[in-house]
Image (cartoon, helix red, strand yellow):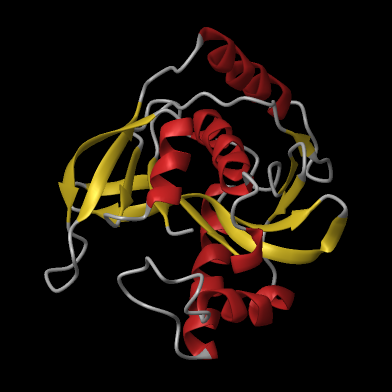
Amino acid sequence: MPNRSQHSTTQTARLVLRAPTEADLDVLFDIYGDPATQRFNPMGAMSNRDAAGHMLWRWQLHWMRHGFGIWAIALRDEPQTVVGFGGVAWREGKDGEQLSLHVHLRADMAGFGFATEVGDAALVLAECHAPFEPVSASVVPGHYAAIGVLRKLGFRAVGQVQDLPWLPAKTHYLADTVRTQGMNEAAVGFRAVGKQMSSSETVAMPAAANSAHAAVLMTR
């Protein structure tokens, strides 16, 4: 079993990704309660802080149980300012639990490639923790920015999925098993390094990720 805290902080080329804390509650509600960031979320914007607190609690519980999960996202130039949340976590689906890649960014952070950068890092982490798990993604039709991100990450459309009977169907995506041999080697290398790290160290992610298999929900 992986060290439960070894991947709590990760750095990519432009981002710092860390486990969320209680101090993130206000910004979490600001982002998930903003209609602009939730435009393509069938559930709509979050209506109260209690819902935000429950979401944060579930994320923290996931970190405690599995040693990975949803990150708080900040720019490396401004590491104290959270601009979104994202990462891989187990999510209940129609066929049981599956890994889900979840990315929500502040509205002014869209269009800079940050969602792709988070997705790459998250897929490497999924390869580290659950290398043989299937990887899928679901996106509301018309969310072209998220579809573009999924294609960059190596996903392909395979059908439709409906989370709840009263919600609109979403396009379901699967990641290719290996996008390139180089990406696969990068993920394997990351896994070997991770085993030697202490809980206080920061994981520097490879520039490219293996798109192993993970379920992805992209809303921004």
Q: Is residue 186 depicted above or below 146 in this figure?
A: above
Q: Is residue 62 depicted above or below 198 in this figure?
A: below
Q: Is residue 165 depicted above or below 181 in this figure?
A: below
- Kindly tell me whether residue 106 is visible in this rendering: no
The number of discs equals 0
For the N terminus, the quadrant is top right
- Kindly tell me whether residue 98 is visible in this rendering: yes
Q: Is residue 40 depicted above or below 173 in this figure?
A: below
Query: In the rendered view, does 141 fall on the left or right side of 155?
Result: left
- Residue extending furthest left? 165
Query: In the rendered view, does 216 fall on the left or right side of 138?
Result: right
x and y percentages locating residue 42 in the rendered image: 30, 70
x and y percentages locating residue 37 in the rendered image: 51, 70
The answer to which of 156 and 201 lies nearer the viewer is 156
> Residue 46 appears in which quarter of the rendering?
bottom left
* Residue at x 16%, y 47% (from the top left corner): 160
The answer to which of 134 and 118 lies nearer the viewer is 118
The answer to which of 190 and 42 lies nearer the viewer is 42
The answer to which of 189 and 105 lies nearer the viewer is 105
x and y percentages locating residue 217 in the rendered image: 39, 53
- Residue extending furthest right? 77
* Residue at x 88%, y 52% (from the top left corner): 77
x and y percentages locating residue 65 in the rendered image: 52, 54
